[in-house]
Image (spheres, rainbow, N blue to C red):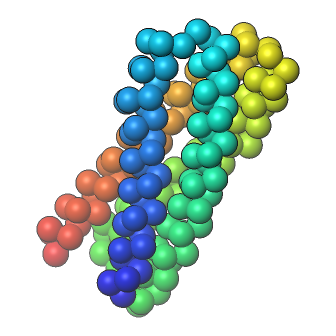
């Protein structure tokens, strides 16, 4: 069980930590030093790489989380904070799916065709959704830790 908890934690840290870095460090730095076309190209390359990691993290979180719930006797037998984590994690996954399929795919197409205005508008939408997901991720981590302490 400890191994699955560790795997679950590492997947969450990769996803949430990646969003934190991108939102709080990379974004302001890119705004400071790059012109819009270079900035949009950078984000396209960053997203391409990061989203590959996120797909792996999402799959790992879902599989390890559901397996841990199973080990604890099923959804009926787990503590309330596990229910909250599951709900918030599923919400994050839905938002991520929307960001990837509805936003990023179109964003990447606009960047490849050098449609900077359209790409910039979509990047603004992605930024807002990542802010929501980052907030949900940080709250989920807090709920996980508080749940452990409340036992």
The percent coordinates of residue 117 (x first, y second) are 72, 10
The percent coordinates of residue 76 (x first, y second) are 41, 82
Q: Is residue 10 above or below residue 30?
A: below
Is residue 94 at least partly visible in the picture?
Answer: no
Q: Residue furthest right?
A: 113
Determine which quarter of the picture holds residue 24.
top left
Q: Nearer the viewer, residue 50 or 16?
A: 50
- The answer to whether 16 appears left or right of 141 in the picture is right
Determine which quarter of the picture holds residue 69.
bottom left
Determine which quarter of the picture holds residue 77.
bottom left
Identify the residue at image location x=79%, y=14%: 115
The percent coordinates of residue 120 (x first, y second) are 66, 16
The percent coordinates of residue 130 (x first, y second) are 51, 36
Identify the residue at image location x=46%, y=73%: 65
Q: Nearer the viewer, residue 142 or 26?
A: 26
Q: Is residue 33 above or below residue 104?
A: above
Identify the residue at image location x=81%, y=26%: 112
Is residue 1 at least partly visible in the picture?
Answer: yes
Q: Quadrant of the C terminus?
A: bottom left
The total number of labels drawn is 0
Q: Is residue 94 above or below residue 126?
A: below
Q: Quadrant of the N terminus?
A: bottom left
Identify the residue at image location x=46%, y=35%: 22
């Amino acid at each position: 069980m400890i191994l699955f908890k560790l795997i679950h934690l590492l997947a969450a840290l990769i996803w949430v930590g990646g969003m934190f870095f991108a939102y709080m460090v990379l974004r302001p730095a890119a705004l400071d030093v790059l012109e819009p076309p270079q900035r949009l190209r950078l984000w396209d390359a960053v997203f391409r790489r990061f989203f590959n990691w996120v797909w792996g993290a999402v799959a790992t979180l879902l599989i390890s989380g559901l397996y841990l719930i199973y080990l604890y006797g099923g959804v009926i037998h787990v503590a309330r904070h596990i229910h909250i984590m599951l709900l918030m994690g599923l919400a994050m996954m839905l938002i991520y799916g929307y960001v990837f399929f509805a936003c990023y795919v179109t964003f990447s197409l606009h960047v490849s065709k050098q449609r900077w205005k359209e790409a910039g508008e979509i990047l603004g939408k992605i930024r807002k959704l990542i802010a929501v997901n980052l907030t949900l991720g940080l709250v989920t981590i807090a709920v996980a830790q508080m749940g452990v302490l409340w036992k």
